Amino acid sequence: MAPIDPHSFTDSTHPLTTHISLTFYFDFPSSTISSATLLSLPTPYTGPLTLDTRSLSVSSVLDPLSLSPLPFSLSPDSRVLGQSLTVSLSNQTQILILSKTSPSSSALQWLSPPQTFNKTHPYVYTHCQPIHARSIFPCQDTPAARVKYAAKLNIPRQLSAVMAARHVERRGPLPSETQGICADSVWCGDDRVVEEFVMEQPIPPYLFAFAVGQLGFREVGPRTRVYAEAVNEVLDAAAKEFAGTEEIIQVGEKIFGPYEWERFDLLVLPPSFPLGGMENPRMVFLTPTVIKGDASGSQVVAHELAHSWTGNLITNKNNDHFWLNEGFTTYAERRIVEAVQGEEIASLNIGIGWKGLVKEMERFKDNMEFTKLKTNQAGVDPDDVYSVVPYEKGFQFLQRIERQVGRPAFDEFLKKYIATFKFQSIDTDMFLNFLKVNVPGIENKIDLKLWTEGTGIPPDAIEPVSNIYSKIVSLANEFKLGRTPRDDEVADWKGQEWELYLENLPKSVEASQVRALDVVYHLSESKNYEVKVAFLQLAISARCREYYGVVEKTLKEVGRILYLRPLYTALVQGEGPGKEEDTAFARRVFSEACDCYHPIAHAVIEATLAKHV
């Protein structure tokens, strides 16, 4: 076997799937999906074909033309990879696989009505990045295998579905389309409806996405709707927050070239969504925590939009080269923010990112492999080592190239890079070779090997410099001397300024200082979760137990890993008096809250607690 991805059983000697047709029957009472997966290969193939699965019950594998069974075998379960499904083919171009998901599928979160905004209907949504599509249907679950797909979703009639694909129609079920996954009478029940979708551009499997629930939408632009649960308060707040989306798209097009995906719709998910946003093409998924009431949530939208060029059009071949997705996208996001909101706001973003990068150096001090851009993740769960390094070190690398060649030349390089590699999956060496051909002599000016294969932060990375950044860092340094900022000094501050200020405060502060800061500025009550969580980390480090009620409430009302991990980590990694009490508190809260977390967030926090306890 010659794997092409450390996180996939896909064999480089096997043909790669070009198209997948999916037929899904959603059973909410059992939290399962019965599915028929029709995989198409580019040419007739004889020999073994190995696919990725996780927690799937595979009932049969068939030749779709004759419906005769094809021999298949499942490997023993691997904690990181799941199970390989190997099928023996004899001059076939297609195979049909009947399977059923597990209620514990790592890509799916099933929400009961009380866990939703509207409290009346259930909800299910996906998150497939980096290697979770295999827990919904068998596939070559590697970004190296880009596929087009079609999907039929059979769901309860009172619900609706959205996908990261073009919606074809909503219609009644037909008995001829069950593909054997359930009885015709079940498929065609009076209470069922079929939503049909197609994705006509080849995407990596981690971008497969859907959500099913009681959904509504608001129009916010000529190519953008905002979807959410059909609750007017949520829809109206989302529409207001993202009203400027079309301007952001147009700025992106000026910098990076045409937007290739037709629609740029947004879906605001329930609070359990584990990320800030997910760049699913045509239908970006967003956490409700980005709705802050001041349009600053549009910066997350700018990041996910930027992925439309870097990540979705050009994709890392596997997770060892994740920086090609996220470093480029972070750079692109900040270019968009600079154009829309100005240099000062972009500089604040860079400053917050810089502090995050410095913190990750401390996190990985015992395993510096994961401070590289080009990593070796063989045998490692990518969710366990997810960090801001590929984002922020990748950004710093690209900014270093821009400084060397100048922005106009770098912009031309970016457009040529995107046009050359669009709808392809590439690795770091392919990028570096392209860079050296198109910017002759760059390797003599920048140590490309040190940047991509070296550990830590290279010496020619630059901490951002701007008036507002310097002022905030200076005020944070004065806090160490016991001075809290005056009202006039922070009158214009929004969430990002406070976040940068709090991130620059010393790790160890007196409880009295924490209380004094909150008495004046009420940071523990902030509607901006970045600010609230940064403050609560400070309160935990000072063992201000009067704030632990707010900590518990926060850990129970949101599922975003960006907030969960630092709060749980702060509780369990402290030393000295009170450590045992904090650890017990963290374990109790997790045991009470974990059923509301997405499976990916659940696993990340479980690993965090296991590491420190």
Image (cartoon, rainbow, N blue to C red):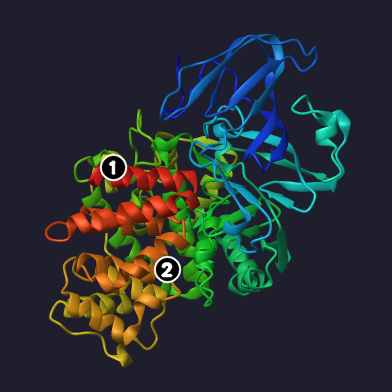
Where's residue 382, x and y in %?
40, 38
Q: Quadrant of residue 21?
A: top right
Position of 508 with respect to 281 (left or right) is left
The residue under the point 27% across, 64% down is: 463
- The residue wearing badge 1 is 610
Residue at the (63%, 37%) spot, across then down: 32
Q: Position of residue 61 (x, y in %)?
A: 67, 17
Q: Residue 309: give x, y in percent of width and height.
A: 56, 50
The residue indicated by pointer 2 is 529
What whole-number distance in Å separates the C-alpha atoms at marks 1 and 2? 25 Å
In the picture, measured across the screen, residue 26 lies left or right of residue 595, that is right
Position of 241 relative to 304 (above/below): below
Q: Is residue 75 above or below residue 430?
A: above
Mark 1: amino acid = Ala
Amino acid type at image mark 2: Tyr
Q: Residue at x 51, y 42 (%)?
A: 129
- Say few, some or many: other residues with alpha carbon within 10 Å of mark 1 (under 14 / 14 to 19 / 20 or more): few
Depth check: 149 or 161 in front?
A: 161
Q: Between 140 and 606, which is closer to the camera in this rendering? A: 606
1 vs 2, front mark:
1
